[in-house]
Amino acid sequence: MEDIAVKGLVIREVQVGEADKLITLLTPDLGRIAASVKGAFSLKSKNAASSQLLTYSSFILRKKGERYYVRESSYIENFMNIRYDLERLALANYICDIAYDIATDTEENPELVQLVLNTLYALSEKQEIPAGKIKGAFEFRLAVQEGFMPDLSCCGRCGREPGGADGGEWALDIMEGMLLCGKCMDEKRELLPEDGDLGGIYAPLPGKVTDALRYLEEAEPKKILAFSLGAKDLPAFGNVCEKYLLNHLGHGFTSLEYYRKIRNT
Ligand SMILES: [Zn+2]
């Protein structure tokens, strides 16, 4: 038997029997690990608060065979305000699902943990920042961190740089990870029969959306939300960030569908 000390965010919990539960921790050093919490639902449990979903805690785990058991724990941050807001809570669950999907059992990924913690902190404490902006910043930054960095320097077809007088309607070619200028989009359309499908996935980049994406590629971890974006550009920003990440992960999430439902009611 060996004990290990680890910090981890509870990203999933499943009740086991009457009083126990199995939690999944996202840790900076050990990736994703599952641990049993004996008596977690008992009133006397000293691990109840620190083993709750969306809580970042210090744990002493005991390994028996292939399983971990929580011996002691104390919470560091519980992002309490998220629980009072249905939209933000739904978004936090979606973020935990993505983290679960990306983290592996053994590999350390401190950048992922930091991004998730910073995002949950913003959802809890930065009520003035729209949830949609926090969501998009998380999605796009995560895609970049995981190695899916699009080329945002110039049109991938003709080499023209964004900005300038003939700005036009730019778009991101999601699958190729490159920009397309309005002229090249038009030329692509002209090659097709009327109402023909362009093929691939293109997300429009109006206003300052390209600048926001460029900012997210380079920003310091704690400053990823320090970019300005007008309210009218927020839907396009949300659209491109979500499509970009989900296309590279290769699937959607039930928790994302739930978030959409909540947001529209
Ligand atoms: Zn072009």
Image (cartoon, helix red, strand yellow):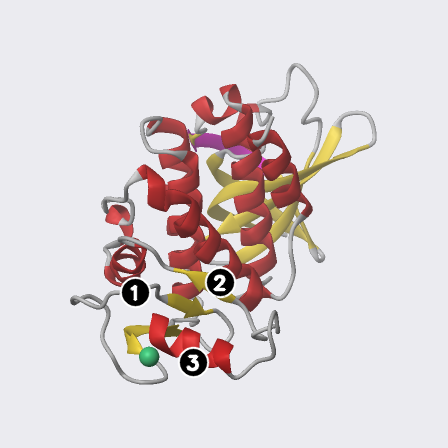
Q: Amino acid at mark 1?
A: Gly
| Residue 2 included in the magenta stretch of the image | no
Pick the quarter of the image with the C terminus: top right
Q: Secondary structure at mark 3?
A: helix
Is the CB of mark 1 within 8 Å of ligand 1? no
- Nearer the observer, disc 2 or disc 3? 3
* Residue behind mark 2: 244
Q: Quadrant of residue 153?
A: bottom left
Image coords of residue 264 (percent x, y): 58, 31
Circle 1 packing at 10 Å, graded few (<14), some (14-19), many (20+), is: few
| Residue 73 included in the magenta stretch of the image | yes
Image coords of residue 108 (percent x, y): 46, 63
198 to 165, vertically: above or below: below
Q: Earlier in the sequence, mark 1 or mark 3?
A: 1
Q: Amino acid at mark 3?
A: Glu
Dominant SS in magenta:
strand
68 to 260, vertically: above or below: below
Q: Secondary structure at mark 2?
A: helix
Spatial distance from mark 1 to mark 3, Cα to Cα?
Answer: 13 Å
* Residue behind mark 3: 187
Judging depth in this view, the residue of 75 and 192 nearest the camera is 192
Q: Which dot marks residue 8?
A: none
Number of numbered markers: 3
* Residue behind mark 1: 168
Residues at discs 1 and 3 in contact (Cβ within 8 Å) = no
235 to 189, vertically: above or below: above
